[in-house]
Amino acid sequence: QVHLVESGGELVQPGGSLRLSCAVSGFAVDYGTIGWFRQAPGKEREGVSSISSGRGHTYYADSVKGRFTISRDNAKNTVYLQMNSLKAEDTAVYYCAAVLGVRVGVPTPYEYDYWGQGTQVTVSL
């Protein structure tokens, strides 16, 4: 059975940094594409970044490009989202999700089969 568990969300000041983790069980992370999504109150869930299976090509939404970095540790079966220069508009519940095989481009929710429970990121003074 596939499980994803996010961690690392917390309250941070604007301009600060956080690293989110997504621990995956049930399959090897390099066999699947892992995506990060976020959902702010009253808004739809949006794709933030993804890392594809195999070679690990990465994709980012324009809103986070240059500030966020997705990476993968195959030995730990964990995917990370390093978030720098955080802004108030980055405040949301962040979810990781997985799908077996390759997906390209900024992730869209309907492409993903397995989801974590989410972790809250709040950017505020």
Image (cartoon, grey):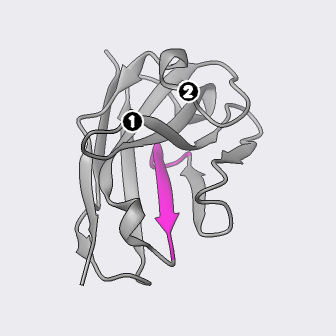
The range drawn in magenta is 74-84
Indicate which label's residue lies in the foreground, 2 or 1. Answer: 2
**77 and 51: which one is in front?**
51
Q: Residue at x 22, y 67 (%)?
A: 10
Residue 71, numbered circle? none
State the separation of the CA atoms marked 2 and 1: 19 Å
Q: Is residue 118 above or below residue 89?
A: above
**56 and 39: which one is in front?**
39
Residue 103, image x and y in percent? 68, 24
- Quadrant (top left/top right/bottom left/bottom right) for the C terminus: bottom left
Residue carrying label 1: 24
Of callouts 2 and 1, the N-terminal one = 1
Residue 109 among those drawn in magenta: no
Characterize the local packing of mark 1: few (<14), some (14-19) or many (20 or more) Cα atoms within 10 angstroms.
Answer: many
Residue 108, numbered circle? 2
Q: Residue at x 43, y 72 (%)?
A: 87
Q: Is residue 23 left or right of residue 29?
A: left
Q: Residue furthest front?
A: 42
- Quadrant (top left/top right/bottom left/bottom right) for the N terminus: top left
